[in-house]
Amino acid sequence: MAADDVTDELVEATLSIVDGWYSGERIDWADVLDRLERCTLDDGRGVDMGVDTNSPAIRRLKSRVRAELRNG
């Protein structure tokens, strides 16, 4: 997955996982990404974040999620 593939839908799905499992706690990103890869997007596609946990896509996803959490 490329950084440009980090859509609003993907960010919302990730926020849903974070809010449900890590509200007020330190986020276990490996677990979040594992849960995210079990999701299906609105168009029926699955999520494949790849294996590099420091990829540009994962860095962008984390950045956008953290910004959303800060902004409430």
Image (spheres, grey):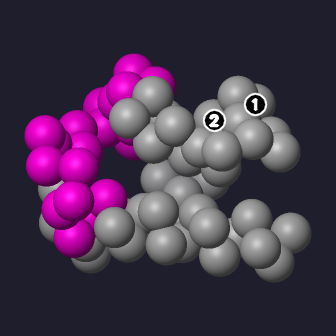
Q: Main secondary structure of the magenta part?
A: loop
Give the x, y percent position of residue 37: 35, 30
Q: Badge 2 is on which residue?
A: 17
Residue 40, magenta (yes or no):
yes
Dot 2 alpha-carbon crowd within 10 angstroms: few under 14, some 14 to 19, many 20 or more: some
Please tell me the numbered disc located at residue 20. Answer: 1
Q: How many marks?
A: 2
Q: Which three-letter amino acid code belongs to the residue tagged 2?
A: Ile
What residue appears at the point 15 percent right and 43 percent down from the top-left corner?
50
What residue appears at the point 70 percent right and 70 percent down from the top-left corner?
68
The answer to which of 22 and 16 lies nearer the viewer is 22
Give the x, y percent position of residue 29: 45, 42
Q: Which three-letter amino acid code belongs to the residue tagged 1?
A: Gly
Dot 1 alpha-carbon crowd within 10 angstroms: few under 14, some 14 to 19, many 20 or more: few
- Left or right relative to 12: residue 57: left
Q: Residue furthest left?
A: 51
Give the x, y percent position of residue 8: 53, 65
What residue appears at the point 43 percent right and 63 percent down from the top-left corner?
61
Q: Residue furthest front?
A: 26
What residue appears at the point 52 percent right and 37 percent down from the top-left corner?
28
Structural distance between the alpha carbons of marks 1 and 2: 5 Å
Element on which disc 1 rests: helix
Element on which disc 2 rests: helix
Residue 68, magenta (yes or no):
no
> Please, is residue 7 above or below residue 16 in the view?
below
Looking at the rendering, the stretch of residues picked out in magenta corresponds to 33-58
- Left or right relative to 15: residue 1: left
The answer to which of 5 and 25 lies nearer the viewer is 25
The answer to which of 43 and 69 lies nearer the viewer is 69
Q: Are marks 1 and 2 in contact (CB under 8 Å)?
A: yes
Image quarter in which the C terminus is found: bottom right
The quarter holding residue 41 reads top left
